[in-house]
Structures are given as C-alpha cells and as structure tokens.
Amino acid sequence: MKSFTKFIIFIAIFLEFLIGTTSAQKFYIKFVDANNDNSINFQLIAINKSDETTYYTGVAPPNDHKNHMLLLTILPDTKVKKQFIWQTTASEKSFLYDIYLTPDNYIYYWTSQGDSRIEKVGKNLVIYWENLSVIEKFKPLKGDRLQIVPVPIPSSLWLLTSGTIILLIISLMRKKIFDLVKS
C-alpha cells in the first residue's frame, strides 16, 4: 500500500510540473498579409515607464535569435510610435517572429521563453514584459492581421513523461508479482 501511495504522489507532482511547464505563456507572433496587397502593415507603440533605462525591441525568427532585427529604441520615460510596412511575396504571405526586449544588447528577454505575457485587445496585441517597465502594443493596419502562436511543447518532454509513467507502472507490477510468487 505504501508503494502505491508513493506512486500516486509522484505522478501528481510530475503532472503538476508538466502542467506548469506547458502553461507558462510562451508565444510567437504571426504577422499576416490578410488583404493580399503583398505587404504587412502594422504600428508598434511602446511605453517605457523606467526613469533611467533605455530598451531596444525587435523581432527574430523562431529558433534563430542571432538573426534578430531591431524595431524600436525606447528611451526612458517615453512613449514611442512607429509604423512598419514589410513586403511579402506570393509564396510567403506571413512571418512568424519571436519578439525580444533588451536593455543592453547582452541580456535578452523573449516572448518564446515566457518573459512576457500577452493580451488581445480587439485586433491589437499588447505585450507586458514581466518585471520590466515596458509595454508594447502591436496594431495591424490596412486589413492585415496579427496572431498569437503558442510555442509548442517539445516532443521529448512528452516522451520523457510517458516513459517515466510506464517505468513506474512496470516497477510496481513487478514488485507485486514478486510478492505473489514469494508467498
């Protein structure tokens, strides 16, 4: 009976860990040319409530953070607004990007790593950077669209979870069978 209780407690803790890992708000933003005019039009409004820190924000392709592109420099205690037009092609009507924020070009905070939370307000996406004093609002223009794309859970995590549960079940069954044979 003790091993069964330990097994249930272990499974509960493991599932809590798995749910905590998957529920952290990690996301990309997909910029979509919804009106088919071969351009993606959006406005970025950033508010820096810090009295002394300048922040830099931009985008990078998923899993390629070295290839990032600066969008805005946000000076201390300011509100910055800039409009962007990105050209698309017939084959590529959308771009999937990881958004970053950095105070010094050494430490980077990424939306894909759960360093922020996002809120959809109408057609706009508002990013609140955790423990930082910056808020960013992405506003689509001219009929284009912005979508929140969750970062997928790695398949290795699912494989680890299922394998661990199967090994625990086998060890419990083996012990019970051994106890039955012994008596």
Image (spheres, rainbow, N blue to C red):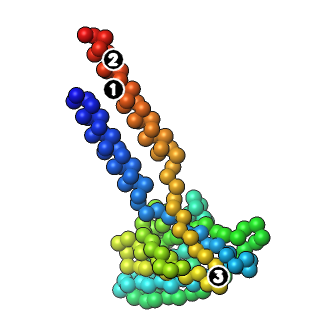
Question: How many residues crowd mark 1 within 10 Å: few (<14), some (14–19), many (20+)?
Answer: some
Amino acid tagged 3: Gly
Point 59% across, 69% down: residue = 30
Q: How far apart are marks 2 and 3 (CA)?
A: 66 Å
Label at residue 172: 1
Specify which label sits upstream in the sequence, 2 or 1: 1
Label at residue 181: none
Quarter of the image with the N terminus is: top left
In the image, residue 174 sits, relative to residue 134, either above or below, namely above
Question: How many residues crowd mark 3 within 10 Å: few (<14), some (14–19), many (20+)?
Answer: some
Specify which label sits upstream in the sequence, 2 or 3: 3
Residue 119 picture location, percent across and down:
45, 74
Residue at the left extreme of this rendering: 2
Point 64% across, 73% down: residue = 32
Q: Mark 3 points at which residue?
A: 143
Q: What element carries label 1?
A: helix
In the image, residue 4 sits, relative to residue 36, either above or below, namely above
Q: Nearer the viewer, residue 74 or 25?
A: 25
Q: Name the residue under label 2.
A: 177
Point 46% across, 89% down: residue = 79
Left or right of 156, for residue 117:
left
Q: What element carries label 2?
A: helix
